Image (cartoon, grey):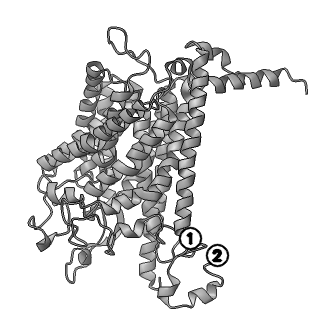
Amino acid sequence: MTDQLAALTTIFTEFYYWVTVVLMFLIHVGFCMYEVGASRYKHHQHTLMKNTMLIPLVTVTWFLFGWWIYWAFPTGPGLAPSIMNESTALITDESAFSATWYTATSELMAINLGDHISGVFWAAFLLFSWTAASIVSGAIIERITTFAFGILAIAIGSVFWTIDAAWGWHFDGWMLKLLGYHDAYASGVIHAIAGGFALGVLMVLGPRIGKFSSSGEPRNIGPRNPWLVTVGLFLIYTGFWGFYAACNIPIFDLGPEYGMEGISYWTATNIYVTPTTLSGITFNFLMSLSGGLLAGYWIAKGDPFWTYSSGLAGVICASAGNDLYHPIQSMIIGMIGVVIAYKLHYWVERKFKIDDAVGAVAVHGYAGVVGLIICGFVLWGYPSSGYSVGAMWDGTTYATINPVGQFIGAIIMFVVLGLIPGYVIAKVLHGMGKLRIPREVEIAGLDYEMMEAAKEDEKAVSSATR
Amino acid sequence: MATVTNWIDHLNKPAEEVVGAVYPGAGSSEGILVIIAVILWIGWHILTSKSESEELSRLAKKRHSANDHKSNITDW
């Protein structure tokens, strides 16, 4: 870089995404604390290790192929032409932003003095991947094998969420063009898909021993340590600031980008490269969090576990349109999402005997779906993109945001890319005898041998004289 | 293996030659590195799956009750 202003802009952007990654690490710390707090004493260490090991498993696969999928799949393939090369095939040519630059063997996937952005942008998306896998992790605690969870984490973290991101989050995604899909802070792209995936796995995995009485009545198990759970959720709130910032481009000149001659307009943009402000989304983040907490406290009658979870659900529900909503709209949407998610959680639990240990399907899945649908009504008529497809396509331009497109988008996220793959992969693992731990181990506790060894160590040390 | 051996000489090159990969083996070793990563990744899954299965079957055979772990809670 030889131009000082260009260098400043580039290095500011590089540092901006780097900071978002650090902040988003707190989401994972929070998830680990939350799961340990929700699990019983005899399963603590395995529960923690399960969620910890998704970090390397998803990271390595995200490097090997996950990131490539994001850049290759915006066209479907076969559903809508790319605005970069006018083809509906996988984007693997030499055009800008092609997946060909993001294979594991690419020189851009390493320290490269000509590229200050790929690594930090890759990492920001990787942290979204961890979040997707962590959402699934909480729902299935105390009875899944670590091997099975690793496979499921790779599937949701490095394959299915990245496909949905290519389709519905990439500026060239077919869902924007055909459906007018809008999901600025990932109500569907992360949360609905992960919630749906978790539900699919739970349908095969079954409940924890003792969760349901012989007459089918659900019993409450936990959380064992509500304070660890609440501190964990506070950390997830904190990390969510990084998540929101990472969904933006911090500084961009939209005039030349949209092909407007002589116009220069510097702004922050959302992931779709349409204008928003960090200031505006700060209003909406806090108001939707507040709406969720208010509704959760009311509907759960002050239960701390659900009240904290509802704060998260409130943000998740409003996230699809939080780049454009008024703060009070965000608050009301957050409240609606929480009430529906809470009611659905207990209805599904009783009706279908689904044991979602931490309410992840409700907080992320149901709240995400509700948020997408509401967004279709509230933002009806807004452009889903600033780009134009132009003459390359009969549709001529991107569809505008609309309720039907958002509803179909929600189905794609929750069911097509979430629930169905989760169910199928869990079925395969179950068929291999690798999905669930033996009944005897579940009763004894996954940590039994570790605890036994620690007790022996304690005896040896306490009886030692030198 | 070194891609750069003198930073002053390197930065004095034309701009298009300055920008680029600077890690050891740039342009020649990436394929081998990816193959090694894939082997390590698959190997890790095989090893840990085997050890987990052994651990679970060993513990299952002991048939502890739901409260047996309480006698193993340490005081330190």
In the picture provided, is A30 more to the left or to the right than B10?
left
Residue A237: % across, % down: 42, 43
Quadrant of the rendered structure where residue A454 is? top right
Q: Amino acid at mark 1?
A: Ser
Res B15 visible:
yes
Q: Distance between the Cα atoms at labels 2 and 1?
A: 9 Å
The image's mark for residue B1 is 2
**Quick one: SS at disc 1?**
loop
Can residue A16 be seen in the rendering of this structure? no
Look at the picture and state if A421 lies above or below A358.
below
Asked if marks 2 and 1 touch (Cβ < 8 Å), the reply is yes
Find residue B75 and report its horizontal and vertical position in percent: 71, 21
Q: Residue at x 56, y 23 (%)?
A: A41
| Depth order, front residue of A276/B72 | B72
Residue located 46% across and 27% down the image: A436
- Report the chain holding disc 1: B
- Label placed on residue B29: 1
Q: Quadrant of residue A131 in the image?
A: top left
How many labels were placed on the picture? 2
If you read the primary sequence from the N terminus, does the residue marked by circle 2 or circle 1 appear first?
A: 2
Image x and y of residue A239, in percent: 45, 48
In this picture, residue A274 sits left or right of residue B57: left
Residue farthest to the right? Answer: A466
Residue A237 drawn above or below residue A170: above
Q: Residues within 10 Å of mark 2 (few under 14, many from 20)?
A: few
Query: Residue A382, position in %: x, y?
Result: 15, 58
Task: Answer left or right for A280 relative to A106.
Answer: left
| Residue at figure coordinates x 40%, y 59% from the top left | A67
Q: Is residue A320 above or below residue A263?
A: above
Q: At label 2, which amino acid type do we have?
A: Met
Q: Secondary structure at mark 2?
A: loop
Q: Chain of mark 2?
A: B
